[in-house]
Amino acid sequence: ISRLVGDVEDFEFAGLKGHSASKSLLIVLSMALHSLGEGISVGVSATAERESIGLFVIVSLAVHNVPEGIAVSLLLINQGMSVWTASIFAVLCNLPQPLIAIPSFVFLETFKSFVPIGYGFACGAMMYVVCTELLPEARHKISRSVLLSTFFLSLGMLVSIAVCAQ
């Protein structure tokens, strides 16, 4: 982001200035990319041969969007944004999901080849934000033992979900 905006100290976004503004823009753009991948998933899964899979994906992503929106809002509030503005940006971050879901449902054969790319964007956007913004900030705010235990607990849950899904 700093390469795109030039001098970060002079950069303004949503009433924020400097590093807070560039971090907030990074969060908003990353979450919007993440939402694109989810939207392709929703559109493609809605056409699944087994109707229960499509419904499962749609419901799970809808439920997932609630804590995701809260997390985005809290990250933006932490950068100095007002609650109202952060809430609006959290909703705007998820707007690409329904906007791409409809075309992917309608043009399934065209978009089917984009599903791995959508997953890659969704995963890559989240990993970038986590590794470059959230983990370094968490390292300064919480103890190393809490950070590591949270990381390994999350990793264990991820592995158990993957094993149970097979």
Image (cartoon, rainbow, N blue to C red):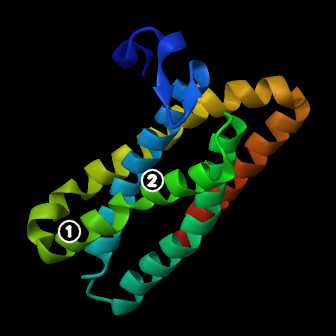
Badge number at residue 93: 2
Query: Is 89 situated above or below 22?
Result: below
Discs 1/2, front? 2
Indicate the amino acid at tag 1.
Ser
Seen at 28% across and 69% down, the residue is 101
Q: Residues within 10 Å of mark 1 (few under 14, many from 20)?
A: many
Residue 89: image location, x then y, percent: 51, 51
Q: Secondary structure at mark 2?
A: helix
Image: 78 above or below 23: below
Label 2 crowd bin: few (<14), some (14–19), many (20+), radius 10 Å: many
Three-letter code for the amino acid on which mark 2 is drawn? Cys
Q: CA distance from mark 1 to mark 2?
A: 19 Å
Q: Which residue is mark 1?
A: 104
Count up the numbered dots.
2
- Going 45% across and 8% down the picture, which residue do you hit? 7
Q: Residue at x 27, y 48 (%)?
A: 117
Vertically, is 94 above or below 49?
above
Q: Is residue 15 left or right of residue 99?
A: right
1 or 2: tag closer to the N-terminus: 2
Q: Quadrant of residue 95?
A: bottom left
**Residue appearing at x 44%, y 59% in the figure:** 94
Q: Tell which of 129 and 123 is nearer to you.
A: 129
Q: Nearer the viewer, residue 133 or 145?
A: 133
